Amino acid sequence: MKFFEATHHFNHSWAQVTAANWMKYPNERCPHVIAVDVLDRHVDPETGILHTERLLTCNQNAPALVLKFLGGSTLSYVRETSELDPKTRKLTMKTQNLTMCNVLKINETVTYSPNPQNELSTVFKQEAKITAGSALSRFSSYIEDFCLTRFRDNAAVGRAGFELVLEKLKEARIEATTQLENAATAATTQLEHAATAATTAAASAAVAATL
């Protein structure tokens, strides 16, 4: 059994991070995730918690020995369940591999919470447990070490990819805000010109009426 833990701070608010989370894939930095399907999504009417279940389809290369014990295919499926609590402002996501789970289990838990020291920052915590089944007893240590290394590499790539998504959304927000400000400025200028023209016309009419 192998364990993995990581903590990271995203320099974006919790609301921005949790909104971006649903747009994380497809991602050019994470090409191993080739599809994401929403299986269920609903809000608990009593708690207000958003529950989501998704299926992730992944495609990864692996050594021949690993593929031999994991069915020989590079295609794998992962089940993800999540709970987003708007009251406590916490998003908890759990994933477990479905492919060959009787031989190898990878259980991951991820949380996103506001940084208590900075409201414009979000704390990301990631934990994973990798366990090879008894069928791999002779090679369990090798398989677990390989999976831990691959998981660690993918976790780093995943964080970098998510940062890219967050930055793109930030740029989109800035551009949208700029466009709105420009539109508001243009509308104000037009109104001022129209008001000036109307005032001038009224003054001219008044002068003409006195002649």
Image (spheres, helix red, strand yellow):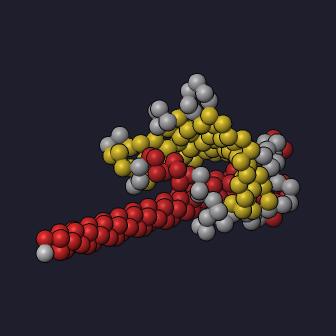
Question: Which image quarter: residue 194?
Answer: bottom left
Image height check: is 121 above or below 43?
below
Image height check: is 106 above or below 170?
above
The x and y percentages for residue 140 are 75, 48
The x and y percentages for residue 160 are 52, 62
Q: Quadrant of the N terminus?
A: top right
Q: Which residue occupies the foreground of this view, 138 or 85? A: 85
Q: Name the residue: 44% across, 61% down.
A: 173
Q: Which residue occupies the foreground of this view, 209 or 79? A: 209
Q: Name the residue: 63% across, 55% down.
A: 151
Q: Quadrant of the C terminus?
A: bottom left
Q: Name the residue: 86% across, 55% down.
A: 71
Count the numbered circles shown. 0
The x and y percentages for residue 146 are 68, 57
Q: Which residue occupies the foreground of this view, 143 or 161? A: 161
Q: Name the residue: 77% across, 52% down.
A: 77
Q: Tell me, yes or no, if residue 178 can be seen here.
A: no
Image height check: is 54 above or below 165?
above
Q: Residue furthest top?
A: 46
The x and y percentages for residue 148 are 64, 53
Question: Which image quarter: residue 61?
Answer: bottom right
Image height check: is 112 above or below 160?
above
Q: Tell me, yes or no, if residue 169 can be seen here.
A: yes
Q: Which residue occupies the foreground of this view, 33 or 22? A: 22
